[in-house]
Amino acid sequence: MKPQEKGKYLILLLFVVPVFLFSCKREQSGSTGWEYNNPKNGGFQKIPYLEQETGPGLVLIEGGRFTMGRAEQEVHYDWNNIPRTVTVSSFYMDETEVTNFAYLEYLYWLERVYMADYPEVFKKALPDTLVWRSKLAYNEPYVEYYLRHPAYRDYPVVGVNWLQANDYCSWRTDRVNELILIREGLFEHYPNQINEDNFNTEAYLRGQYESGKRVDGIPDLNPNKEYRNVRMEDGILLPEYRLPTEAEWEYAAYGLIGNTIDELIPDRKLYPWNGHAIRNSNEKYIGQILANFKRGRGDNMGVAGRLNDNADITAPVYSYWPNDYGLYNMAGNVSEWVMDVYRPLSLEDNDDFRPFRGNVYKTKMLDEDGLIMEKDSLGHIQYRDVDPKLDNLQARRNYKQADNINYLDGHWESNINFMELKDDPNNSDGQKMMYQFGESTLVNDKAHVYKGASWKDRAYWAVPGTRRYLTEDQATPYIGFRCAMTRVGSPIGLGY
């Protein structure tokens, strides 16, 4: 059964099964013996559920353990990717990098919804096309054409910083979930959304979005109510699209699912493909370059008549061979943003299960009556950082503060220049203290990891274990991104 078909059956089951159960013996609670789906008992529902629907553009990455970190010699002597065994849960990832055309769809929507009253929202999302400029090269055609010309529509979008990539993921979540509700007959197509009157998944789940409804909702078995909105407990709406973590990206890039015998991994990969060479060894395609990267100084694509990778800059996202998960260009084409905040010793500090550095815990803002505040002017639910006093974090054992980016990462007050940095008016947020940002390093809490080789990198960076970083508001002509999504429930799905 196709994932889209599974979604269609879910809403049908929500309506049909409870009605059917009224005429036969209903399932009973194993805890209390009370019947589910019975209005006479209060109407507590147990919704039939198959499994998570696969969102558009995604493929399932079956999780497991792997050795994360350096697989190649440490030529830069950074020692920032020490090998370590970790476990990654199953998740979904985009089959390809996000393309120019997909990003143009996003920009068109923002312009249509926000441009009249909030033009800054649209302008903030625009990629920096000037990243193509180089003082001693003629790259001006890419400034003008790369993002918008149809010749490049299937090429990966670049010039997008980490913040913009996260905003795109959030927008994509809402558009996909809106279409699911339309597909299931609960919403009409509503193209006149403007300003705060636009579909937002969280606002809908909390009863703060009603525009475009086709029907009042799903019949509610609560005897005091007639209809209700779809809830998380129904399993219809998808989890959020997001950037992958560094561990997820690296795990997915290796595609070790094709290199195992039972629980053994007899051959560790150097690249996302088998072997230690960058050319295809298959007799039919022998000698062909397996990814888009720079083969040597001044050699971006080879010799006319025999171009080695058929790309001078980026290439269409479905170029070259996918890895064993079916992911394209996990080496070469563009480097890719991941969620993690960069630290040189992340692989020593992080947990060995779902490792990640960058947690800043938030909670929904409440009004004076203790209710969730109305959505903001852009139609989003409002959040704030958790507060140690307001949220009683003193009683918690697993965390004591909102911002955990610096957890186990030293103590900036022990810096020999602490007093000088503390009084520095340009250091009001403390970003400069720990690593003396801008003087001896670019490491701070706004520096994020990007992974993989790009069209202008040598093969060394095509090894998934390599890692680099850039400040979150910076963009380049060689960094793009792809989205991921959490897998809920079984790691491998139905029938296993």
Image (spheres, rainbow, N blue to C red):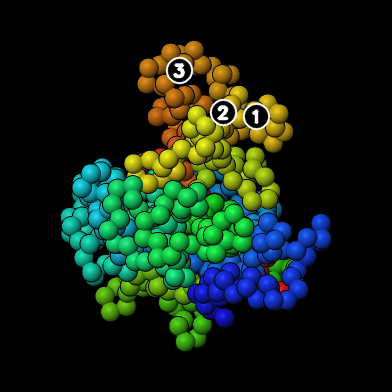
Residue 423, percent from left and from top: 43, 13
Query: In which quadrant is the N terminus drawn?
Result: bottom right
Could you tell me which residue is drawn at 42 percent across and 74 percent down?
Answer: 320
Looking at the image, residue 12 lies above or below residue 432: below
Q: Residues within 10 Å of mark 1 (few under 14, many from 20)?
A: some
The local secondary structure at tag 3 comes to helix
Res. 343 visible in picture: no
Q: In the displayed image of the protein, which residue is found farthest to the bottom?
A: 284
The local secondary structure at tag 1 comes to helix
Could you tell me which residue is drawn at 44 percent across and 70 percent down?
Answer: 185
Sequence-earlier tag: 3 or 2: 2
**Nearer to the camera, 165 or 452:** 165
Q: Amino acid at mark 2?
A: Asp
Cα distance in 3D space between marks 3 and 2 = 26 Å
The local secondary structure at tag 2 comes to loop
Compared across the picture, whether 4 is left or right of 192 comes to: right
Could you tell me which residue is drawn at 41 percent across and 45 percent down?
Answer: 380
- Mark nearest the camera among 3 and 1 is 1
Residue 436, percent from left and from top: 46, 26
Q: Amino acid at mark 3?
A: Leu
Residue 106, percent from left and from top: 32, 58
Which residue, given by chain and number where applicable, does mark 1 sit on? 393
Sequence-earlier tag: 1 or 2: 2
Which residue, given by chain and number where applicable, does mark 3 sit on? 421
Res. 246 visible in picture: yes
Which residue, given by chain and number where applicable, does mark 2 sit on? 387
Q: Pointers 1 and 2 in contact (CB under 8 A)?
A: yes
Residue 260, percent from left and from top: 69, 71
Could you tell me which residue is drawn at 41 percent across and 22 percent down?
Answer: 427
Cα distance in 3D space between marks 3 and 1 = 29 Å
- Mark nearest the camera among 3 and 2 is 2
Q: Residues within 10 Å of mark 2 (few under 14, many from 20)?
A: some
